[in-house]
Image (cartoon, rainbow, N blue to C red):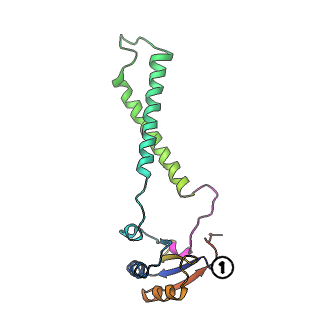
């Protein structure tokens, strides 16, 4: 096998890229990923991307925040240092609602930011990973795994017929900004 890892089809128009995806899928060629400078509605369904599981993470972080907020209030107000304030009970549940709500929102937001950075490998000091630098500016890129799809001439012809401005063969997985 060759050292080519990815075949990159560069398009100037998003409609041409969507047409290219249709042509490749009609010929049973699996697409690794698409890189675009702007969101394109419907591309996830066309590529078969599964729905995100981030709502599950948000619920877990929110439940953790609710539990921690209520536990902190219960421990301080009822267990550790109960005080008689105006004859009120030491565990006034309605008074716990605002603090519990705020801790829930805080932990949910911070947890989602941490999950986003972890899931997308956006750690401080890490170089961005992109297939082609023009995908962040004005090009729409279709990346095809060259190891899985061995008929490179067919892929090249399909991409050019669909309106690809350029077809490139990448030997490395990602190109950094350096």
**Element carrying mark 1:** loop
Q: Residue at x 44, y 79 (%)?
A: 28
Residue 167 visible in the current orientation: yes
Q: Mark 1: few, some, or many residues within 10 Å (few <14, many ≥20)?
A: few
Residue 125 magenta-drawn? yes
Residue 152: x percent and y percent? 54, 85
Residue 103 visible in the current orientation: no
Q: How many marks overall?
A: 1
Which secondary structure is most common in the magenta stretch? loop
Q: Residue at x 44, y 22 (%)?
A: 74
Q: Which residue is mark 1?
A: 3
Q: Residue at x 40, y 15 (%)?
A: 90
Residue 81 magenta-drawn? no
Q: Residue at x 53, y 55 (%)?
A: 119
Q: Quadrant of the N terminus?
A: bottom right
Residue 126 is left or right of residue 19, and the answer is right
Q: Which residues are magenta?
A: 122-135
């Amino acid at each position: 096998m060759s050292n080519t890892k990815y075949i990159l089809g560069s398009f100037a128009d998003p409609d041409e890229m969507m047409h290219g995806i249709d042509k490749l899928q009609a010929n049973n060629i699996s697409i690794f990923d698409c890189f675009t400078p702007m969101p394109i509605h419907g591309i996830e369904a066309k590529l078969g991307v599964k729905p995100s599981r981030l709502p599950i993470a948000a619920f877990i972080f929110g439940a953790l925040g609710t539990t921690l907020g209520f536990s902190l209030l219960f421990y301080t107000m009822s267990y550790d240092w109960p005080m008689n304030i105006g004859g009120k009970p030491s565990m006034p549940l309605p008074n716990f609602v605002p603090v519990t709500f705020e801790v829930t929102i805080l932990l949910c937001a911070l947890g989602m930011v941490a999950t986003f950075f972890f899931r997308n490998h956006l750690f401080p000091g890490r170089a961005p990973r992109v297939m082609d630098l023009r995908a962040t500016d004005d090009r729409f890129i279709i990346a095809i795994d060259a190891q899985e799809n061995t008929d490179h001439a067919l892929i090249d012809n399909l991409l050019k017929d669909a309106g690809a401005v350029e077809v490139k063969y990448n030997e490395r997985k990602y190109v950094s900004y350096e």
